[in-house]
């Protein structure tokens, strides 16, 4: 049995961590704290291209915020501040005890994503992880899910996917016919062309739902 999990805003609260480093940047360079909402909006939870976010921030702040500082924010970003909650850690350990193999499937750059995985101690819990830049495929492409199964030493025959992103996590699982849980984080599902197998408010609730189905 394989349980695949997204990293950002599923296993860890990437947006909360990113907001903290954005606030630090704005304060350091004398910019309004309220601009944090603007930066979060153009960042799109990390899904907007880094070069587009950089371009928008440079255009807004000019010489007031050095380009090097903006790049450091976007390249290091939330990796310095992410945390794994005790409840999520316990849920993952329960899955392991129940015989599940665990694999993180994440879009992003290898150095940044692996820093999050190691910083939070996820590397000592999961069996494997795959990062899109490392395998040359991004969610929802099927290849990245197959790569995760291979890395975990199994296949997709008895696999579930848990994630917060509709178009990457749930669409990817849906295309492969895999049962899945959408972590809503309080949002409503609006996509009409496909639906998740189950909706959970948090990653912890999602993991326990999967365990209850095995």
Image (cartoon, rainbow, N blue to C red):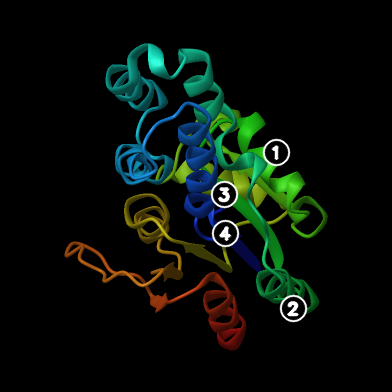
Question: In the figure, 145 relative to 159: above or below?
Answer: above
Q: Which one is earlier in the sequence, the residue at label 4 or at label 3?
A: 4
Give the left or right position of residue 126, taking residue 208 as reference: right
SS at mark 3 in the image? strand
Mark 4 touches mark 3? (CB < 8 Å) = yes
Q: Position of residue 211 (x, y in %)?
A: 62, 82
Disc assigned to residue 105 = 3
**Residue at image mark 1:** 115
CA distance for labels 4 and 2: 15 Å
Residues 189 and 179: in front is 189
Q: Residue at left 44%, top 68%?
A: 183
Q: Residue at left 38%, top 60%?
A: 170
Q: Which one is earlier in the sequence, the residue at label 2 or at label 3?
A: 2
CA distance for labels 4 and 3: 6 Å
Q: Residue at left 74%, top 55%?
A: 122
CA distance for labels 2 and 3: 19 Å
């Amino acid at each position: 049995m394989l349980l695949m999990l997204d990293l950002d805003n599923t296993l860890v609260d990437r947006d909360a961590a990113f907001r903290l480093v954005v606030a630090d940047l704005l304060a350091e360079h004398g910019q309004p704290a309220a601009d944090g909402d603007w930066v979060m909006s153009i960042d799109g939870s990390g899904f907007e291209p880094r070069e587009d976010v950089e371009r928008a921030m440079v255009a807004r702040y000019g010489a007031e915020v050095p380009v090097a500082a903006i790049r450091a924010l976007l390249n290091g970003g939330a990796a310095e501040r992410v945390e794994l909650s005790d409840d999520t850690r316990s849920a993952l350990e329960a899955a392991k005890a129940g015989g599940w193999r665990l694999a993180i499937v994440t879009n992003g750059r290898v150095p940044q994503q692996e820093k999050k995985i190691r910083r939070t101690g996820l590397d000592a819990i999961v069996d494997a992880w795959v990062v899109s830049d490392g395998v040359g495929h991004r969610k929802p492409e099927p290849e990245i899910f197959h790569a995760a199964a291979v890395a975990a030493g199994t296949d997709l025959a008895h696999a579930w996917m848990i994630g917060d992103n509709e178009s990457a996590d749930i669409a990817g699982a849906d295309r492969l016919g895999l049962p899945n849980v959408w972590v809503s984080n309080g949002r409503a599902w609006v996509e009409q062309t496909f639906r998740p197998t189950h909706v959970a408010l948090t990653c912890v609730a999602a993991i326990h739902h999967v365990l209850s189905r095995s």
